[in-house]
Every structure is written in structure tokens, then in C-alpha cells.
């Protein structure tokens, strides 16, 4: 049993017709399911995120999770891999990087 709870996860890209507008999909439930079955090591792509984005633009991913009741924030590009088991771990070879989404953090009620 892992101690990872997905609070929120989004996956998508800029609108091809308007680079100031995002086209994203809420993949919160999908990510939780994948983490539960994969043990927490997740490759971020259309297949894993169960989306079929027609865009030729590179997709981006952001997630807020709780690991052992501590919140962590992640962001990466399509094709990269995230190890959600070790939230402080940066796998440079696989392109894993954290992202602190302060406005999202505040909306979730966490103190920053």
C-alpha cells in the first residue's frame, strides 16, 4: 500500500490557435489509479494519462499530491517520468522536476 493521495493533476498544452490559452484535462483520478498500480513511478504521456490530444504541441503535466500527509508539487513535460514515492527526489536523467503552485496551494488550504 502506498501513502500517496493525488489532490489534483492536469495534463495538456497551449491552444494551437491561441498561445495564451491552455487546453488541459483533469487527470486526477487517472493519476491516482496509475500510481496505485505502478507503485508510484509514472511516465507522463497521452497513453498513461488516458487522453488523446490532437495537438502536435508538447503537452505539460502538473500535480499536487500528498505523500505520508505532506503536500508536494510536480511538473514535467510529456515523455518524462515522475517518481511519486520520493517527493524530494529529482531524477535529472528522466527529467523529473517539482513545481510549487502557490495559488493552488493556497486554494487547497495549505499554509505557505
Image (cartoon, rainbow, N blue to C red):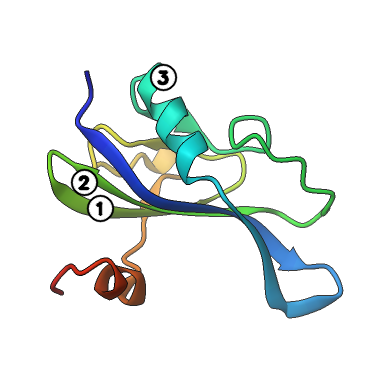
**Circle 3 residue:** 38
Q: Are marks 2 and 1 in contact (CB under 8 Å)?
A: yes
Residue holding disc 1: 72
User: Disc 3 versus disc 2: distance between alpha carbons?
Assistant: 19 Å
Which SS class for mark 2?
Answer: loop
Residue under pointer 2 = 88
How busy is the neighbourhood of tag 3: few (under 14 within 10 Å), some, or many (20 plus)? few
> Depth-wise, is mark 3 or mark 2 nearer the camera?
3
Query: Could you tell whether 9 is left or right of 64 in the image?
Result: right
Pointer 2 or 1: first along the chain: 1
Q: Which mark is residue 85?
A: none
Residue at point 41%, 45% (across, down): 96
Task: Give above or below for 58 relative to 52.
Answer: below
Please name whichever residue, 7 or 86, is drawn nearer the observer in this view of the structure: 7
Q: Which residue is located at x 59 percent, y 30 percent?
A: 48
Quarter of the C terminus within the rendering: bottom left
Local SS, label 1: strand
Q: Position of residue 58 (x, y in %)?
A: 70, 54
Amino acid at each position: 500500500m502506498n501513502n500517496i493521495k493525488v489532490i489534483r493533476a492536469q495534463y495538456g498544452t497551449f491552444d494551437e490557435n491561441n498561445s495564451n490559452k491552455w487546453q488541459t484535462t483533469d487527470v486526477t483520478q487517472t493519476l491516482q489509479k496509475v500510481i496505485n498500480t505502478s507503485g508510484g513511478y509514472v511516465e507522463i504521456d497521452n497513453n498513461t494519462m488516458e487522453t488523446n490530444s490532437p495537438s502536435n504541441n508538447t503537452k505539460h503535466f502538473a500535480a499536487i499530491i500528498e505523500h505520508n500527509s505532506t503536500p508536494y508539487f510536480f511538473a514535467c513535460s510529456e515523455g518524462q517520468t515522475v517518481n511519486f514515492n520520493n517527493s524530494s527526489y529529482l531524477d535529472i536523467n528522466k527529467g523529473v522536476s517539482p513545481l510549487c503552485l502557490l495559488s493552488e496551494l493556497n486554494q487547497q488550504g495549505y499554509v505557505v
